Image: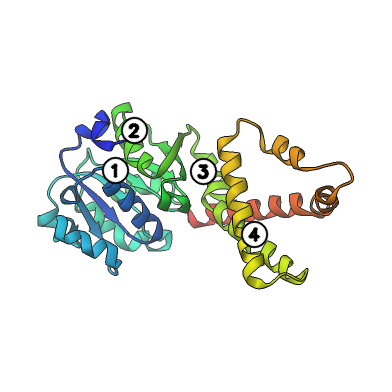
Amino acid sequence: MSLSNLNPLSNLRGSIVLAGAGKMGGAMLSGWVAQGIAPSKLAVIDPAPSNEITKLVADGLRLNPAPSEVGDVSVLIVAVKPQMFSEVAPALKSLLNPSTIVISIMAGVPLAKLSQSCGGKAIRAMPNTPAAIGRGMTVAVAARDVTQAECDAADALLQATGLVEWIGDEGLMDAVTAVSGSGPAYVFLLAEELAGAGVAAGLSPELATRLARETIAGSGELLHRSNLSSETLRQNVTSPGGTTAAALAVLMDKDGFRPLLARAVAAAAKRSKELAG
């Protein structure tokens, strides 16, 4: 989908400022540029920008500009570590006006704190790292004073890196963070451990790694394309009395994968609440 054809963005006359261009912020920036937002409309605030971001300066991107060079700010995306937010918030607030849309992708920082610290129209979003390849999953919630038009503009920006879901209850964001925000790490750990188990079973590290990576990538793509539930897809692979059934008997034991993952998600959600301060 071309962002140039999205009407919600046509009303953004001022700059789009990204504060924090690490892995997630950088992925979002790459998505915007790839989808047609001119680098000259963008400004990045980051003390250690990547080479890819630095190269965009030649195309008009403003990197660590002085406040006078930023001009009117239509949207601010706050992508710094949540522990750093209190330190950088005063400088960010000085760039904004009451109508600026402020989108936070920081884990744990609630809308109330975002509004109090920065002002503007606060939106809280939680993307995940597949955003780097345009396959991200973002969940967003808006403060009560944010209009539908402002939500539409934020939605268009967030869609540059994948799917977007909106919720009305901010209290669900800790669970969202634990499931989809942190979720890619669980999948990568599965690939890591599956390869390790393959080595223990006699495969070479190279072959075991390739089998694990391609199996998980292919299964994810099948899940993405299929209209069937994950439960049905699992059942379709499992022949009664077969090898998969033997493995699943271990994974689905009362002390197996299900309760372990439930504890992991609960731990991540708890940490998200703690980050709210």
Tell which of 20 and 38 is nearer to you.
38
Residue sticking out furthest to the left: 68
| Kind of residue sitting beneath label 2 | Cys
Report the Cα–Cα distance between label 4 and label 1.
32 Å
Residue marked by disc 4: 212
Residue at 54 percent across and 47 percent down: it is 180
Instruction: Check if mark 2's residue and mark 3's residue have beta carbons within 8 Å.
Output: no
Neighbor class of circle 2 (other Cα within 10 Å; few <14, some 14-19, many 20+) is many
Q: Is residue 4 above or below residue 61?
A: above
Q: Nearest to the eye among marks 4 and 2: give it.
A: 4
Instruction: Check if mark 4's residue and mark 1's residue have beta carbons within 8 Å.
Output: no
Residue 42 seen by the camera: yes
Q: Nearest to the eye among marks 1 and 2: give it.
A: 1
Residue marked by disc 2: 151
Q: Is residue 51 left or right of residue 237?
A: left
Mark earlier in primary sequence (2, 3): 2
Mark earlier in primary sequence (1, 2): 1
Query: Percent position (x, y) of residue 208?
Result: 67, 66
| Kind of residue sitting beneath label 4 | Ala
Q: Which quadrant of the figure has residue 176? A: top right
Marking on residue 252: none
| Kind of residue sitting beneath label 1 | Gln
